Amino acid sequence: MRRLLKFLHTMGAAGVLGAMASLVVMLALAPAPAALPGYAAIRGAMGAVATWVFLPSLAVTLLSGLLAMALNRGYLNAGWAWVKLATGVLMFEGGLVYVQGPMKREAEQSARALAGLLDPTALAASLEGERGTLWVLLAVATANVVLGIWRPRILRIPQ
């Protein structure tokens, strides 16, 4: 069970980092909303990555980490594990509220604009916020990987 949880946690983390990196690249390459067909296509792809790669990977990472903590008594006294838990919960909340939600909404709005049901000037209002959020979450996810590899002796929990 221990190896399975470690495998799931590692694969989930790889999925989260890969999804966020691809979203950063797609944001950088996204055409202006004036080029509506290209903009709608890339926003649709970003919505799909956020929904089908980022969010499930984040859930697998968080759940496997929680199960690993529950099943391994050594993690309960390790400060680094508690820091990873706290930042993991923040990543999940941030991922839902600031990544998956806005990207899915923008994909839907750009598809509606392409169909002529929405004014294209209403698009791309959150681009800078999305970009900044992704960079922050990438930094937090990288810090979590560092904590998991080096396991520093921080916040030693007394028994």
Image (cartoon, rainbow, N blue to C red):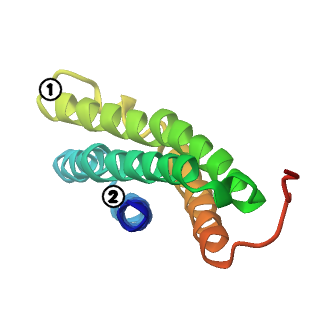
Q: Nearer the viewer, residue 109 or 49?
A: 49
Please give the name of the residue rendered at 38% of the width and 50% of the height, measured from the top-left corner. 60
Query: Residue 30: which disc?
Result: 2
x, y (%) of residue 117? 17, 21
x, y (%) of residue 46? 29, 50
Q: Looking at this rendering, what residue extends furthest in the left direction?
A: 115
Looking at the image, residue 92 lies above or below residue 113: below
Q: Quadrant of residue 143?
A: bottom right
Circle 1/circle 2 CB separation < 8 Å = no
Please give the name of the residue rendered at 39% of the width and 68% of the height, measured from the top-left corner. 3
Residue 68 is left or right of residue 15, and the answer is right
Q: Nearer the viewer, residue 8 or 117?
A: 8
Crowd rating for badge 1 (residues with CA inside 10 Å; few <14, some 14–19, many 20+): few
Crowd rating for badge 2 (residues with CA inside 10 Å; few <14, some 14–19, many 20+): some
Residue 15 is left or right of residue 146, and the answer is left
Q: Quadrant of residue 29?
A: bottom left
x, y (%) of residue 102? 41, 35
Identify the residue under disc 1.
116
